[in-house]
Amino acid sequence: MCDDDTVADNNEYLRAKNLTRRQFGAVTAGAGLAMLLPRAANAQAVAEGDIDVTTPDGVADCYFVHPSSGAHPGVLIWPDAFGLRPAKQQMARRLAESGYSVLVVNQYYRTQRAPVVNTTNFAEARDVLAPLMGSLDTETQTRDATAFVGFLDSQPSVDNNRKIGTMGYCMGGPFTMRTAAAVPDRVGAAASFHGGGLVTAAADSPHLLVPNMKAHYLFAIAANDDQSQPEAKDVLRDAFARAGLPAEIEVYSGAMHGWCPPDSTVYHEAQAERAWSRLLVLFEEALA
């Protein structure tokens, strides 16, 4: 998860690449995010829009995108610490073009509508993001997960005869685990990309929820996250093995925390594409 160690690691990564954060921002702004993400092969036409979803705690602003016709497996996306923004919308659109009905949420809706910041530099946004991140806990995540899955199940573009998928980035990684445990009969597949806080010493550590899940899992782990907590991957492997659930757990060499979103300062295209390809395999197999 985003913290001082991650910021230091990512700064060192940029120095090694001879690329400043300002230069990275200029590149992404000049090229446009659409130039960074390839379209799905045989991409389907999609319908999209900003929507509000009612939860027990209020009204969440979200983005919903799905193929223009038919009913398809639903997918719930939990953003990273920087929240709902154009890059996440584009990732959702890309997934929808592959045949999924995708909801991306603003996890901070109780406090502020999206976008909450206009940067993906955690050091610059710390004063805004830290209290927002701290406002969410196990109970809020569980209530939200149930509400968002319920929303997906109510949509005509979602095939209720197929399981739902969920995926999350950074702080969204553990959110996927709480979602899979909260609605186990609906969530058939889940993926965590550079997820933080998946294994902790706390009594409510996400890994302790594995016995309550039925989902097949993908954990794409950043190299520097693994260096900071090398035992976490083994704890996860053991937990899923004991539960008899399939789980692909891999450390992505050379990929820093936050490498998947195309607007990230440490975006690693090759490894991001490999992680995306594994996600598509997971959903194809587990949501059939």
Image (spheres, helix red, strand yellow):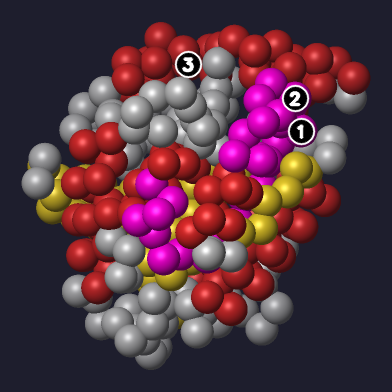
Disc 1 or disc 3, which is closer to the eye?
1
Gap between marks 1 and 2, in whole Å? 6 Å
Gap between marks 3 and 2, in whole Å? 25 Å
Can residue 219 be found in the magenta stretch?
yes
Instruction: Give left or right: position of 253 versus 58.
Output: right
Q: Residue at x 33, y 42 (%)?
A: 106
Q: Quadrant of the N terminus?
A: top right
Disc 1 or disc 2, which is closer to the eye?
2
Residue 73 in the image: x percent, y percent?
41, 77
Residue located beneath label 2 in the image: 227
Sooner in the amino-acid sequence: mark 1 or mark 3: 3
Q: Amino acid at mark 2?
A: Gln
Identify the disc placed on residue 223. 1
Q: SS for tag 1?
A: helix
Q: Residue at x 75, y 25 (%)?
A: 227
Q: SS for tag 3?
A: helix
Q: Amino acid at mark 3?
A: Ala
Instruction: Give left or right: position of 56 versus 29.
Output: left
Instruction: Give left or right: position of 185 versus 206.
Output: left
Gap between marks 1 and 3, in whole Å? 24 Å
Do the residues bearing badges 1 and 2 touch, measured as CB atoms within 8 Å? yes
Residue 121 sits above or below residue 82 on the image:
above
Q: SS for tag 2?
A: helix
Residue placed most toward the observer, 141 or 58: 141
The answer to whether one can see residue 110 in this image is yes
Residue placed most toward the observer, 10 or 186: 186
